[in-house]
Amino acid sequence: MSKKNRADQTPKQDFIFQKKNYLFMFIGIAFIALGFILMSGGGSDDPNVFNPEIYNFRRIRLAPTLVLIGLGIEIYAILLNPYKKKN
């Protein structure tokens, strides 16, 4: 068997994800990071004083929703098939 035949038989290695997958992954990471940034803060400098800002809309509803949306986008990015042909 010649060297040329051996080279033809080696399988070509491709990446599992393509550019479209990575784009959606970065968008999902941005959503998750934004959710955690919005969730932070709201503490008090004095431990004897209660700060009701910890229970506002941004920290209780908006930030966790953004994190969950980001996780959904990540799952979509993993399951997205970039090789699918349009009919």
Image (cartoon, rainbow, N blue to C red):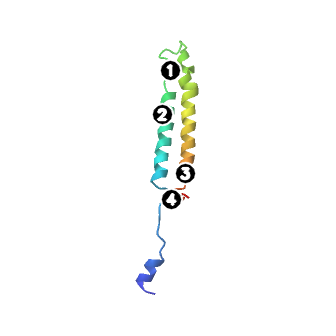
Percent coordinates x, y for residue 34 in the rendering: 48, 33
> Pointer 3: what residue?
78
Give the Cα distance between marks 1 and 4: 44 Å
Q: Are marks 1 and 4 in contact (CB under 8 Å)?
A: no
Q: Amino acid at mark 2?
A: Leu
Label 1: state its secondary structure: loop
Packing grade of label 3 (10 A; few <14, some 14-19, many >=20) is some
Label 4 neighbour load within 10 Å: few <14, some 14-19, many 20+? few
For residue 43, the mark is 1
Q: Which residue is mark 2?
A: 34
Q: Which mark is residue 14?
A: none
Mark 4 secondary-structure assignment: loop
Residue lying at 58% horizontally and 25% vertically, measured from the top left: 60
Q: Residue at x 49, y 46 (%)?
A: 24
**Residue 70: percent from left, percent from top:** 53, 39
> How far is mark 3 from mark 1, CA to CA?
36 Å
Q: Secondary structure at mark 2?
A: helix
| Amino acid type at mark 3 | Ile
Q: Residue furthest front?
A: 87
Q: Is residue 87 above or below residue 35?
A: below
Viewer-side residue, 39 vs 50: 39
Amino acid on which the number 4 mark rests in the picture: Ile
The answer to which of marks 3 and 4 sits earlier in the sequence is: 4
Outermost residue toward the left?
Answer: 3
